[in-house]
């Protein structure tokens, strides 16, 4: 399922507020970057993507010098992401951060991932180009020993396997980085798009419900048409809250996997049971046995379970049995479905209806995917509105079409229609036509 798309870059005041409000958190990732180069563009999107993947990252581009908050964040983080851009070396604070990070890496089990953003690895290693210009200025006012310390740290960081962004698509690049970070601390990997538009408002009610510490079993239904972003919301909610529960499980594409073969449903039950018990379950002989085993396993545990893409109540009963007789205090079960009345009217559950993006959000998401900027230029606005109109404001369609048109700015309407026709024939894109029933052709 596609994502909902990227939040607008925060203002510097909101960035500072976020930094201070998070000062008591335990960070998992430290972001080192030069704000002038990337702080309101690439790094913002990377930070948001880490956040929505449930990874707590520290960033602070407002400080001029290293302070205790930055030192603590480096020391407690498991991973440092160093965004090496053309202007990185002009910042004394960035260079001092880099020295601290490399020292921390040598003395602790600390992972460093260098990200070469629009700069060659050799330029960083040998301090040529813009790095040479920056060091020429530094030599005029900084001691020789300090300058040599910075140069050694830059040379050392280029010897670490990192990520290089050249002419690729930023969204894919950011997703690759988040996946790499997710796997290092041995965390659950549930990837979402790098660009997430409209998430905050749509996630608010789900977040409040998950924070509710009621002793009753809570069943939450995320409802909406295909491609509207139900799975993305479920992934984000799961990543943000699963650590607060005794056990947890995310079962994706339940409808499809249950119908794969005769054992499809039993395989899903086995996966759910293994996650709850935190050990491998070798065999379940039939679905009734599986249901009984699952109910017994969660009876004395507080669990978080996501059943993604369920199309009938029979499937739900196969996993847990009858909801109202389930004794598992404080557990939360999230179901994503296209069927708004999936459960019987007498059953108690919380419903979250997900609406499509509005026109402004749709334009923003499409522009981020196609042009890697917040909104289309005046040259591309007519074409963008045309494409958005054909997508019914559905994030899945906007993401696929935006990616297929990446870099194609200033197309004529005839060229645009040829591109859209071609998008229908791209291998793997059949899901868009089949699921969303969208026509890309001119009326």
Image (cartoon, rainbow, N blue to C red):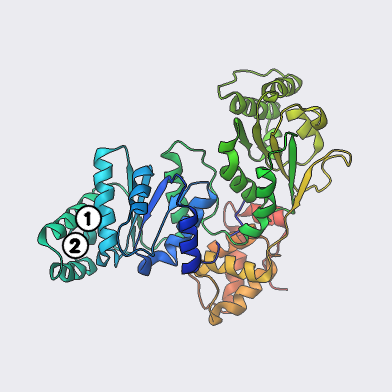
Residue 127 tag number: 2
**Element on which disc 1 rests:** helix
Mark 2 / mark 1, whichever is N-terminal: 2
Relative to 424, 309 lies left or right:
right
Determine if residue 409 is in view. Answer: yes
Relative to 136, 43 lies left or right:
right
Other residues around mark 1 within 10 Å, as few (<14) / some (14–19) / many (≥20):
many
Quadrant (top left, top right, bottom left, bottom right) of the C terminus: bottom right
Q: What number of labels is visible?
A: 2
Instruction: Name, please, the residue furthest toward the right.
Output: 346
Label 2 to label 1: alpha-carbon separation: 8 Å
User: Depth check: 79 or 327 in front?
Assistant: 327
Instruction: Determine which quarter of the picture holds residue 327.
Output: top right
**Residue 335: image location, x then y, percent:** 72, 41
**Residue 198: image location, x then y, percent:** 63, 61
Residue 154 tag number: 1
Determine if residue 413 is in view. Answer: no
**Residue 349: image location, x then y, percent:** 79, 42
- Residue 352 against residue 263 in the figure, above or below: below
**Residue 25: image location, x then y, percent:** 47, 47
Circles 2 and 1, Cβ within 8 Å, touching? The answer is yes
Instruction: Determine which quarter of the picture holds residue 386.
Output: bottom right
Residue at horizontal 64%, vertical 71%?
360
Residue at horizontal 71%, vertical 39%?
255
């Amino acid at each position: 399922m596609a994502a909902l798309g990227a939040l607008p870059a925060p203002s510097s005041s909101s960035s500072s507020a976020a930094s201070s409000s998070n000062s008591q958190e335990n960070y998992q990732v430290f972001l080192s970057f030069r704000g002038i180069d990337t702080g309101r563009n690439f790094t913002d999107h990377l930070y948001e993507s880490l956040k929505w993947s449930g990874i707590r990252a520290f960033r602070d581009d407002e400080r001029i010098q290293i302070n205790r908050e930055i030192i603590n964040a480096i020391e407690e983080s498991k991973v440092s992401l160093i965004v090496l851009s053309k202007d990185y070396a002009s910042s004394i604070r960035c260079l001092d951060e880099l020295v601290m990070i490399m020292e921390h890496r040598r003395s602790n089990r600390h992972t460093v991932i260098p990200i070469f953003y629009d700069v060659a690895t050799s330029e960083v290693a040998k301090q040529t180009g813009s790095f040479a210009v920056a060091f020429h200025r530094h030599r005029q006012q900084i001691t020789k020993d300090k300058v040599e310390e910075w140069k050694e740290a830059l040379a050392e960081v280029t010897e670490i396997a990192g990520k290089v962004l050249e002419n690729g698509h930023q969204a894919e690049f950011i997703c690759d980085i988040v996946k790499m970070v997710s796997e290092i601390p041995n965390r659950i990997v549930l990837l979402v798009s790098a660009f997430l538009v409209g998430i905050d408002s749509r996630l608010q009610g789900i977040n409040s419900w998950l924070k509710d510490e009621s002793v009753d079993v809570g069943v939450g239904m995320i409802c909406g048409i295909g491609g509207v972003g139900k799975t993305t919301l479920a992934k984000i909610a799961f990543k943000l809250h699963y650590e607060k529960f005794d056990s947890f499980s995310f079962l994706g594409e339940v409808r499809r996997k249950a119908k794969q073969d005769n054992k499809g449903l039993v395989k899903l039950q086995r996966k759910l049971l293994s996650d709850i018990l935190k050990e491998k379950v070798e065999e379940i002989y039939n679905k009734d046995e599986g249901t009984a085993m699952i109910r017994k396993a969660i009876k004395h545990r507080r669990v978080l379970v996501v059943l993604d893409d369920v199309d009938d109540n029979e499937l739900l009963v196969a996993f847990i049995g009858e909801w109202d007789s389930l004794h598992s205090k404080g557990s939360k079960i999230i179901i994503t479905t296209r069927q708004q009345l999936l459960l019987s009217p007498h059953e108690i559950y919380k419903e979250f209806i997900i609406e499509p993006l509005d026109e402004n959000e749709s334009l923003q998401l499409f522009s981020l995917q196609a042009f890697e900027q917040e909104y289309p230029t005046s040259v591309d606005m007519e074409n963008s509105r045309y494409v958005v109109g054909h997508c019914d404001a559905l994030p899945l369609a906007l993401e696929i079409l935006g990616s297929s048109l990446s870099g194609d700015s200033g197309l004529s309407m005839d060229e645009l229609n040829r591109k859209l026709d071609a998008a229908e024939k791209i291998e793997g894109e059949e899901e868009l036509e089949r699921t969303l029933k969208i026509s890309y052709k001119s009326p």
